[in-house]
Amino acid sequence: MKTTTLAAREGLGSSRDASGGLWNIDELARYLRLSRKAAYALVASMPVPRLRIGARLRFRPHEVEAWLAKQAAPRVQQKTNRWARSRKNEDAG
C-alpha cells in the first residue's frame, strides 16, 4: 500500500520531487487553508521552518508537516493532563 503525505494529496508536491518542491507563501497558505495575509502573520509570529532566498520566503513541505505535528502533540498532552486533574479532584471531593 502506497502512503502519501497530505501535501501530495493536496496537489502541492513534495520536497522529495526532482524539482526540489519548495513552497512559496501562497502554497503554504493553501496547504494550511489560510488566507495569504494569515499565512504571513503565522510565519511572523511562530517559528515556522522556512528558508529565505533573497527577499522571498520558501518552505520545505516535510519540515512544515513535522512542525505541525510537534505543535499538535503538546496540546493533546495538555488536554490529557487537564482531564486527569479534573478526575482526581472529582474523586477527592
Image (cartoon, rainbow, N blue to C red):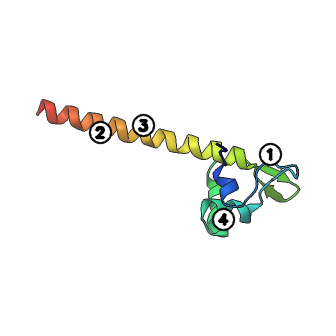
Comparing labels 2 and 4, the label whose residue is closer to the camera: 4
Q: Residue sitting at 66 percent across and 57 percent down?
A: 9
- The amino acid pointed to by label 3 is Gln
Q: Which residue is mark 1?
A: 16
Distance of mark 1 from mark 2, alpha carbons?
A: 40 Å
Q: What residue is pinned by disc 2?
A: 83
The answer for how far apart the CA atoms under marks 4 and 1 are is: 19 Å
Circle 1 — which element? Answer: loop
Of the two numbered discs 2 and 3 on the same chain, state the one appearing first in sequence. 3
- Secondary structure beneath dot 2 equals helix
Q: Residue at x 65, y 45 (%)?
A: 3
Residue 77 - label: 3
Q: Is residue 90 above or below residue 61?
A: above
Mark 1 or mark 2: name the one nearer the start of the chain: 1
Q: Residues within 10 Å of mark 1 (few under 14, many from 20)?
A: few
- Amino acid at the residue labelled 4: Arg
Residue 44 occupies quadrant:
bottom right
Residue under label 4, please give it: 30
Percent x, y of residue 54: 89, 56
Where is residue 4? Give x, y as percent: 67, 48
